[in-house]
Image (spheres, rainbow, N blue to C red):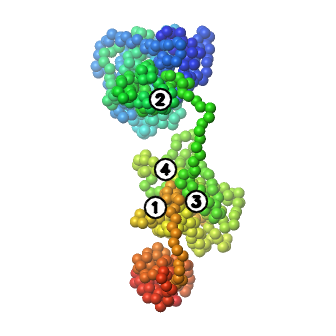
Amino acid sequence: MQWLNRYLAPSDCSAELAEHILTEAGLPIEEHKPLENGDTVIDVEVTSNRSDCLSHIGIAREIAAARYTDERFELVMPPINDPTPGAPIGNELTLENRVPDQCPLFTARLLRNVKIGPSPKWLVEALESMGARSINNVVDVTNYITYELGNPCHVFDHKKLAGGALIVRYAKPGEKVKTLYAGEHELRATDLVVADTERPQSLAGIIGGYDSQVDENTTTVVFEMATWDPSHVRNTGRRLGIRTDAAYRFERGLDPRTIEDAARRAVELICEVSGAELAEGVLREGAPLPQNKVVELRQSRCDTVLGVPTDPSETTALLEALSIRVEDAGNGVLRCSIPPHRSHDLTREIDLIEEVARARSLGVVPARNTIDVTIREPQPSEKGVNALGDVLTGMGFFETITYSFTSEDKAKLVLRVGSETVSVDDDRRKLEPTLRPSVLLGLLSTRRANQDARTSAEGGIRLFEIASSFAQKAGTRDSLERRQLAVLMDVERTKKKASDEDKQRSIRIMRALIDQLVQTTFGVSAQLVVTPCDPVHQGYQSGAHATIAVRMGDALIELGSFGLISDAARKAEGLDEDLVGAELWIDDLVAPYPPLGSAALLPQFPGIDRDLSLILDESTTWRDVDELVENLRLDRCVGREFVSTFRGKQIGDGKKSLTLRVQFRDDSRTLTHEEVDPQMAQLAESAKSRLSAEIRV
């Protein structure tokens, strides 16, 4: 606490009072740790969005902003006295920043005639109270600044930098860097480094290099302070397993506008403890500095959210105590200029309302003993999902809940063309680091578990699951996450090994299931369009796959696909049974639920049904026949349906016999067969000419 009190006036804030203020401000204390000298260390729990609180100044600013205690404090920033500069840097040091998008600002200063040695007592005690050990006077200052201001920094031995240069760049594939205390690491092309003209000298934002460290022989020091893209620091640090105080802060975001004063403060202390002479000039490379963001705060909105009014003058005082400049824009609107140290955190009006609540104390927000809850009926989409579940369970399917992760090899089997897998770099998922591109993978894994347990069911095992699939567009990071209904069923075999007829019959069962699912959400009049095509991924067998769509007026809504599971997919899971699977986009499937009902009078007069058997090429589909009948628009034809398909020696190789039933009716009287004969003759002739069909008698 004695170091924290350096930045408060009056400097007598106790650990107990600090805990009370910080807890009320949403920064609870994890632990009190008494020291031998009578001082106390407090461990503050800081959320990931509050990188500004990872320093003594940040915590002191929170205590000074409190306006709900009898004791008031003011923030006291450490004074900065720039040392008298010596000769200019000149050509002794050069700086090149090749990645300003990843390193918004890199600064470098040169200090000559440095005397490396032990740190003064005050600096050693300060570091030890913060849980750090003293190394030498210059390095200790860089660590002290990290804790005091929250800006990590680093020093290089100038004579150990090849070419007297610092180059901020991406690492070359296979390039290595030897770090101060985390060993040597081989780098990837996505890692950022600070290099000289020959090799990397530090891992950007994470840890310094061993080869350029400051030691007792150092006489000239290069001091650098920079800021880095949080995601790059986080990804590299996690992959290499290196955790440092610097990385912890850079991962949470540091504004480049905070660097100048922090660097001046650090250089002043280095000169003070080592007798160094600061070279005139500062090397700066990076992107243009951002401007202060202005966010408008409506007083009425603040009062509504908090549930308790705040006087506008008090709102202004509370925000200004947090270093937020406030202007009255009239009509109850305050224009708030966000300071650099909060630029990553305060971006919206609601963020400022939270600051008002914290500065007033979260205790002022009224809490009710009871909460009014209104029970609403399920949304139509949820009802639709439940209705689909009823259909599936009614047809003997069991619902599963499976893992979202799989292996890279299995994922590629069900990866659609034009997409890439999404993986995580996490030691806990070494064997299965990839998010599933299809929910079918979970069903296949569940089927294997049933096979291993020798589980059986009449008609075969049937499974389904509604869950998300994950992928991204090839060459981009655009997410392709979608919710799927995946269905898997055993092929019903009549013998030990499934025949082609068994497979066809099971595919027809799956088609019937899909028909029922579509009718459940789109209505009984929905027109299902099944189009045989090449598989959408390697998980389906070539020649036994089709896409599914629903025709609604002139619109065609794609719903997914189904087919026979490929040998490669079954082999990947070690499955013996032949399987049929389907993948449907659940959000599109349930979107029209509940379906619009329709009512009509029952027919007053009997109709006539006529069957027609056509001998067709094997490649001719039912859809071809169905479209032929529809386009003919036969007089008084009210419907048609598929009856059966026959294959045999009587038909010939490469041929099949398809039987369809055509329905005729007249709403005003009973039809005669003589009135239907011309239409059937027309249909037969069209089938001969357009489909090269033969009429089977």
Asked if labels 4 and 1 touch by Cβ distance under 8 angstroms, the answer is no
Label for residue 388?
3
Q: Which residue is mark 2?
A: 303
Q: Residue at x 58, y 22 (%)?
A: 29
> Between tags 1 and 4, which lies in front?
1
Where residue 558 is drawn, which disc sits there?
1
Does 260 sit above or below residue 550? above
Q: Which residue is mark 4?
A: 481
Q: Secondary structure at mark 1?
A: strand
The label number, if any, that marks residue 690 in the structure image: none
Which residue shows up at 64% across the image and 58% down it?
A: 398
Residue 416 shows in this picture? yes
Q: Nearer the viewer, mark 2 or mark 3?
A: 2
- Looking at the image, is mark 1 or mark 2 earlier in the sequence? 2
Would you say the residues marked 4 and 3 are in contact, meaning their CB atoms lie under 8 Å apart? Answer: no
Please name the amino acid that badge 1 sits on. Answer: Glu
Q: Is residue 169 above or below residue 85?
A: below
Amino acid tagged 2: Asp
